[in-house]
Image: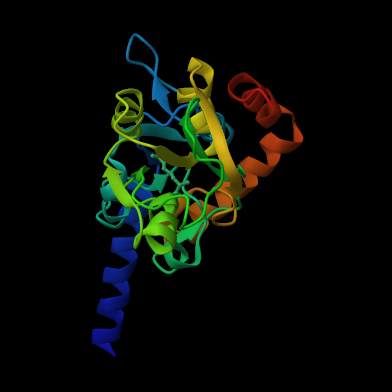
Amino acid sequence: KMMVMLLCALAMAASSVHAQDGDKIRIAFDVPYEPFEFRTPDGELTGFEVDLARAVCEELKADCEFVVQAWDGIIPGLQARKYDAIMSSMSITEDRAKVVLFSEPYYNTPSAWFAPEDSTIDSVDKEALKDKVIGVQRGTTQDAYVSDNFGSVADIKRYTTSDDLVLDMEGQRLDLVFLDYPVGEETLLKKDGYKTVGEEVKLGEGMGVAFRKRDKDLAERFNKALEKLKNDGTYDEIMKKYFDY
Ligand code: ARG
């Protein structure tokens, strides 16, 4: 009985420490991923999710800290407690939901194929993509989709960051890139010289904030705040600032 009491006391002490450091919410972003998260010319973090995160934190009256984290280590970093939430255009998928807890979706977009304007690729199938060089960001839903469907015929180049991917497209080292639509629109279509090819593809069930599985309370607080921001017009205002459709 003593032992049980001792264990309870220890557990309580541990959880109160946990509540303490829960006062500060650290949120991770992989930048750049324009227009979701990127830097202004003076190096300040900005973008749809950065503004949305700021609004959520204000709503929660929480002290938030933004952490920049490369995409390929972004889930391990969450598990390792380097931060408490990921707000990085992460698509809600069954596989990821096995290891993280997702908020309700706060954005939804298909993925799309982008090619140089003079590209002769006019459809997306195994025949058309044979020996073509396709760029994706490593570890994304786009990477998984292209690997599964065209891995046997195409040459897939995987990039750590979306800007390296775009640079290689501009350097004409890629025939196609496969990206969340708004990112391709922002980084390629807006520059001229690029077009979309084939059909859009829906991957995942929208984008959500990812938390550690056990942080159910934090996820609930985010869900409530997001709902409030949707109802009071803040969400739409932030949307309008970053998306033109
Ligand atoms: N939506 C895609 C996924 O979940 C790509 C997200 C990449 N995000 C980023 N900030 N780099 O895999």
The residue under the point 33% across, 9% down is 42
Coloration mode: rainbow
Picture quadrant of ligand 1:
top left
The residue under the point 64% across, 27% down is 239
Looking at the rendering, which quadrant does residue 220 occupy? bottom right
Q: In the orientation shown, which residue stands out farthest toward the bottom?
A: 1
Measured as percent of width and height from the top left, residue 5 is found at 30, 80
Looking at the rendering, which quadrant does residue 214 occupy? bottom left
Q: Nearer the viewer, residue 73 or 146?
A: 146
Measured as percent of width and height from the top left, residue 192 is found at 51, 16
Q: Does any portion of residue 88 appear in the rendered image?
A: no
Q: Does any portion of residue 231 appear in the rendered image?
A: yes
The residue under the point 39% across, 14% down is 40
Quadrant containing the N terminus in the rendered view? bottom left
Q: Which of 15 and 206 is in front in this view?
A: 206
User: Viewed as shown, does residue 115 lie left or right of 59?
Assistant: left
Q: Nearer the viewer, residue 16 or 58?
A: 58
